Image (cartoon, helix red, strand yellow):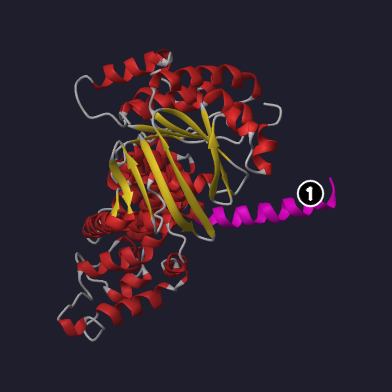
Amino acid sequence: MSLFKLGFGAAAALLVLFLALPVVALFVTTSASEILLGLRAPLVGPALRLSFFTTTASLAIVVALGTPLAWLLSRSTSRLARAVETAVQLPVVIPPAVAGLALLLAFGRRGLLGGLGLQLAFTTAAVVLAEVFVSAPFYLQAGTAAFRRVDTELLLVARTLGARPLRSFARVALPLALPGLVSGAAMSWARALGEFGATLMFAGNLSGRTQTLPLAIYTAMESDLGAAQSLSLLLVLAAFVLLLIVRSGGPALFGAPRVPR
Amino acid sequence: MLEVDLDARIGPLPLRAHFSIASGPLALVGPNGAGKTSLLRVLLGVLGPARGRIALDGVPLLDTARGIELPPEQRRLGYVPQHYALFPHLSVLANVEFGMPRGLSRPARALALLESLEVAHLAGRRPAALSGGERQRVALARALAAEPKALLLDEPLAALDVGARRQVRDFLAARLRTLALPTLLITHDAGDACALAERIAVLENGALVQLGTPDELRAAPATRFVADFLSGH
């Protein structure tokens, strides 16, 4: 075996091992009965319900507002559109703690909008806002790319066939971009589900109101490691299923057409 | 009757053209960058020139003097783009139904239209499974389904390989004659222009330099390009 193969093989194996080991540890250091016991801890139920509710709400907001924005960004060639496209990706690279502080300064009691009597910090609404803030870029990026692949000529033909802009969007652009939109939504949902730092700073850690699954894991760590581990396994499984969906060109699972290009 | 009277500027390019098509095909030819595509986009309503008038059967599609500029969906122009641009996610039948008003008889009418173009057996297929010639017929059927008052064809034969070209051209030529709709077809090929159209309009540097039958153009070519274009055809 050449030195090249040996070196690259060793480096590759080392990284794969390192990435896999913590996940393996999550599974092998517990048992089925311990998991079931952990899931009965009192903070599990409320956190599960809250995470389900808030991530559903944030995904709905991201899709409802993000789809029009992604469409506009994909069709515009203006400098403003490019600037907006870059700006909306900022939450991906902003540290979560900074995002939490920024949200407080915008929507907190003494924040920019606080003077208007708008007090969202440390409420369930704050959880949703934090999730929207960190997860929207994932949907926007995938959505803009998917819409950009839609041939402009198809939309023009639809118009000449009597379709107004909204109908040509709904009948042509949307179905053709659907696979990309679905995987974008899946990535966005996963990011919202895992959101921790910004939520902790902006919404706090109140059981039943702002304590989502990741915050419940953090809280349980101090008293009940079993519960923390059970919740972690739950999140890993959800993430894994999602990853499979996205990687398998999963939109096919949703009945979206596969378009040969 | 399609009437075009433009004196405009599209970006850096001037666009001056004055012509009308009563019925049957007019071929629009010209060197690359002469403004053929710009003219097409102005007709379709994607580009809005500062000054000009376009009317179809007396109805103004564009009249800058009166502030009229209809959007593409109100122009009643049947458009067959260069690579046909069939909707890839829809069946052939659904492609044709797209421009038809909703109704119980819609599938039957779409099928009849496909039948008239001898492609009814492809109704259930996806566009990706069709040959170039089949795609062209479906694209024509789709355009006709919306009952247009004029047709615009952009390089209708350019997407075909040489073997299929002749047969598709003959079929298209016969079909366009039967339809008797005002038809503007853009081409860069003199043979196609002569086979498909009775008259040829020549666009150079954004201006219409000559319009006439192939014989008229051959007898008295207005420019060097016209003479070169038709030599040997």
Position of B119 relative to B228 (above/below):
above
The residue indicated by pointer 1 is: A5
Asked whether the viewer can see residue A88, the reply is yes
Q: Which element type, helix, strand or loop, lies under badge 1? A: helix
Residue A101 as seen in the image, left or right of residue B163: left
Amino acid carrying mark 1 in the image: Lys
Q: Which residue, as the protein is rendered here, is positioned at the far left?
A: A117
Q: Quadrant of the N terminus of chain B?
A: top left
Q: Which residues are magenta?
A: A1-22
Is A5 inside the magenta-drawn segment? yes
Residue at x 35%, y 54% (from the top left corner)? A189
- Percent position (x, y) of residue A40? 25, 54
- Percent position (x, y) of residue B68? 28, 53
Position of B228 relative to A139 (above/below):
above
Q: Quadrant of the C terminus of chain B?
A: top right
- For the stretch drawn in magenta, the main secondary structure is helix
Residue A78 as seen in the image, left or right of residue B146: right
